[in-house]
Every structure is written in structure tokens, then in C-alpha cells.
Amino acid sequence: MITGLIIGTAFIAVYVGLQRSPEPRHLPIAVVGEKLTSTARAGFGDAVAVTPVSNAEAGDALVRNGDAVAVLDAAAPGTLTLDYAGASGLSESGAARQLVAGLARQAGVRVQENDIVPLATYDSRGLSAFYVVFGVTLSSFVLAQGLTAATAKVRLRHRLYAMGGFAVAIGVVAATVAGPVYGSLTAPFPLLALALSLLSAASAFTTKALGAWLGPAGIALAVLTLTTIGNATSGATIGVDLLPGWAQEISAKLPPGAAVRAVNNFGYFNGSHTLAPLAVLATWFLGGLGLVLLRQRIAQRRTLIAKVGQ
């Protein structure tokens, strides 16, 4: 009962708490020209991390590679041009558009907007990555929890084989449904399946390791870390640059956040910056596997010592 209350309270507190009043913090926006850059820095303050660029083409390149949410230019008199990435998420692109609209009102000019990296047609709210990542994480956790409870009946190598095989299977199934079938995620199928398979392995083997070392408390810790905090701070529902500081710090370091970045970068931003999230997923997977094997070795050694002592 206590564990359930803690998990339920944490789930509600984190998810609802992050939705209350998200404010941009160092939102990356490229700005063309020295004069407009100075104006933007003064007008946006800490809400925006302004990156000066020499021309709109250079800014567009940053946006298409995911290094900036938008690029702001004043090419025509009385008009600000905002090229933004809708694929960055409605919260981030919406925040950029609102900030620029406020700046334009102060200057008495109008804004011309262009979505140069739009969301997929069948992902109009930009939430497909969140639901796919959440589903893969949850199913992998459930599998690992069940196998942890079946320790006395199923040999360790069979449990490890099951989790590894499941990771490949759920990765392929999830990528097929969200990709070719529904057309909601635009990442190339092999890369999408790879990212989701690594997510499943990271989630399952981490859960198994925590359960092996800490027992029921480890399973509860896995719920809090992976399915609650990990998914809430992944940046899929609320853009990373609108999260509070503590959430920004851990977002990319947890499996769900790393998976969301890999899926979106493969699908929308030319595959840029994908090595880091894939490395995070692989680290969680290998770390979990290593801890499970270490726990088994310690248990075997203790059993051997006990037999010798008898």
C-alpha cells in the first residue's frame, strides 16, 4: 500500500506539476544580423539563447539540424520573418512564436511565419513519439518485473534471452505500427526499430538489475525512474527548453528522454545528434546486464562458500 501510494503520488505530482506553468529557459533561436541580435537579446532575456548567424540560410540550416527551434530575420522593412521547426514540438515552437510575436508588437512590426520542419501529417500534435516510447518502456518493465518474480522457476540465462528477444520483437512491432502502418513517425524503419529495441533493453535490464539487488524496493525505484520521471521529462509532451532546470539536467540521461531524441532526430532533423542518445540507451542496457550478472556471481559464490562450510 505504501509503495503504491508513493508511486501514484509521484506520478501525479511530476506529470501535473510540469504542466502547470512551463516557461522557456534558454530556448535556442538563431537571429540574423547584429542589430536584430542585440534587440532580441534585450527583448527575450534569459528565455532565449540567441545564436547570431550571418544570413537566413545559415539559420535555416541550424533549424533543420535541430540546433535551433527557429531563425529570426528582418529582411523586409516592417516585417520580421520567423522560420521555425514545428517538429520541435508544439510547446517549443509555440513558445518561439509567442516570444517573437511579443517582440514584434513592441517594435510595431508584423511577423511572417514559415514552418520549415513540419510535423508528420499523422502526428499533428507531435505526441506519437511520447506514446510509442511510453508503451515500449512500460511493456519492457512489466516483462522484467514478471521475470524477476519467476526467479525460482526460470533460469537466469533464459530470463536474459527472453528480455533480449522481447527487446528486438517490441522494437520491430512498435516501429512497424508507428511507422509504415500509421505513418506517425517518419524515421527510417531500421533506425526507428534500433532505437526502440535499445529502449526496451535499457528498460528491461535496468528493472531486472534493480529488482535483483534491491528486491521489491528496486522494482518501485524502476517505476519511479523509468516510467514516471523518465517519461515525464523526456521532452515529448513539454519541450526540454520549457522544463525546470532539474528536469533539463536529467532529461537526456534517462532512457525515455534519450529514445525521444533519437526517434525525432532520425525522423525530422537529418539524423543529427543521434549518437549520444543511442549511447545512453546502450549504457543503461549494458549496465543493467552487468549488474544482473554480478549479482548472480555473488549469489553463486555465497552458495559455494556455504556448501564448503558444511
Image: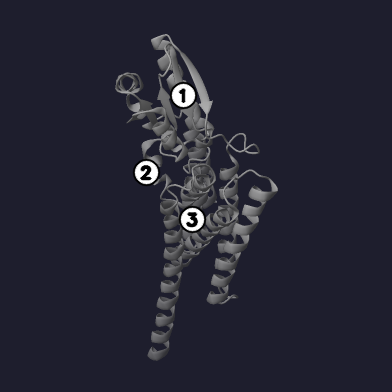
Residue 144 % position (x, y) = 56, 63
User: Tag 2: Cα neighbours inside 10 Å, few (<14), some, or many (≥20)?
Assistant: few
> Tag 3, which secondary structure?
helix
CA–CA distance in space, label 2 to label 3: 19 Å
CA–CA distance in space, label 1 to label 2: 28 Å
How many numbered marks have been drawn onto this rendered protein structure?
A: 3
Residue 23 appears in the figure = no
Q: Amino acid at mark 2?
A: Glu
Question: Which residue is at the far top?
Answer: 108
CA–CA distance in space, label 3 to label 1: 42 Å
Foreground disc of the pair 1, 2: 1
| Residue occupied by mark 3 | 222
Label 3–label 1 contact, CB within 8 A: no
Residue 273 % position (x, y) = 42, 48
Residue 199 appears in the figure = yes
Which one is in front, 210 or 258? 258
| Residue occupied by mark 2 | 249
> Tag 1, which secondary structure?
strand
| Residue occupied by mark 1 | 82
The residue depicted at 49 percent of the width and 38 percent of the height is: 13
Q: Amino acid at mark 1?
A: Leu
Which one is in front, 159 or 179? 179
